[in-house]
Image: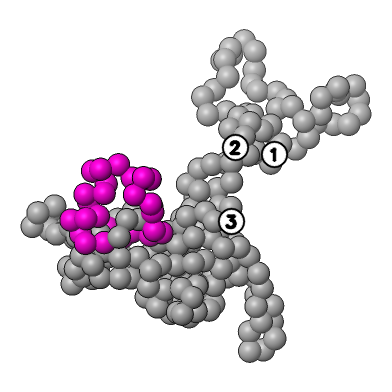
Amino acid sequence: MKKGIIGKKIGMTQIFDEVGNVIPVTVIEAGPCPVVQKKTAECDGYDAVQLGFADAKEKALNKPMQGHFKKAGVSLKRHLKEFRLASAAEMNVGDVVTAETFAVGDKVDVTGITKGRGFTGAVKRWNHHTLCSTHGVGPIHREVGSMGANSSPSRVFKNKKMAGQYGNEQVTVLNLKVVKIDAEKNLIAIKGAVPGAKDGIVFIRDSVKA
């Protein structure tokens, strides 16, 4: 991994390219992210940096976390994330990673927490077909339907796609394109949709399958 940053999803909009085509984009406030901790191959077995994002109040953090930031000489942050960057060995505690780390045209992977939808049925959760509307089917047409044979195996297999908790899970969307960068406002416009609701925290890194 060469690039990585923590950001906050602002929302979606659309912009026009030089030809006039409409491009749907997600606007992300990316950084600034100071380096709070540095891990080295000699001490930890690998090279990485821990980045912080979004200022926090003192009452929001316990004393061990406050000491962690005080040791690094960095203001209190709400979010921490470790990135195994290729340039981690060259970075030092206190360095700041900004949106300018990325460039227009870069392919990135974005990780976030999807919207929680609570307990949902199989149609909404797994995109199952509804049951027939005729021939005596009912009164429920959105139930899961047949779940297997009776005498053999006489049970429902594990991991059967049924109703249950939907959403509120970590999802990564691959190979998204950086369309625009506003360095002054720390904004990155990425083509397409990214996981999560507005103001949700996302992690951006260079694409692993570009």
Circle 3 SS class? loop
Q: Is residue 105 visible?
A: no
Q: Residue 170: percent from the left, percent from the top?
A: 47, 46
> Which of these two is toward me, 148 or 37?
37
131 in the magenta segment: no
Residue indicated by mark 3 = 198
Instruction: Please say if 167 is above or below 4.
Output: above
Q: Quadrant of residue 124?
A: top right
Residue 166 bears which disc, if any? 2
Circle 1 SS class? helix
Amino acid type of the residue that numbered disc 3 sits on in the rendered structure: Lys
Residue 124 bears which disc, if any? 1
- Magenta segment boundaries in residue numbering: 48-74
Task: Kindly indicate whether the residue at mark 1 contacts the one at mark 2 (C-beta within 8 angstroms).
Answer: yes
Q: Earlier in the sequence, mark 2 or mark 1?
A: 1
Q: Residue 120: percent from the left, percent from the top?
A: 66, 33
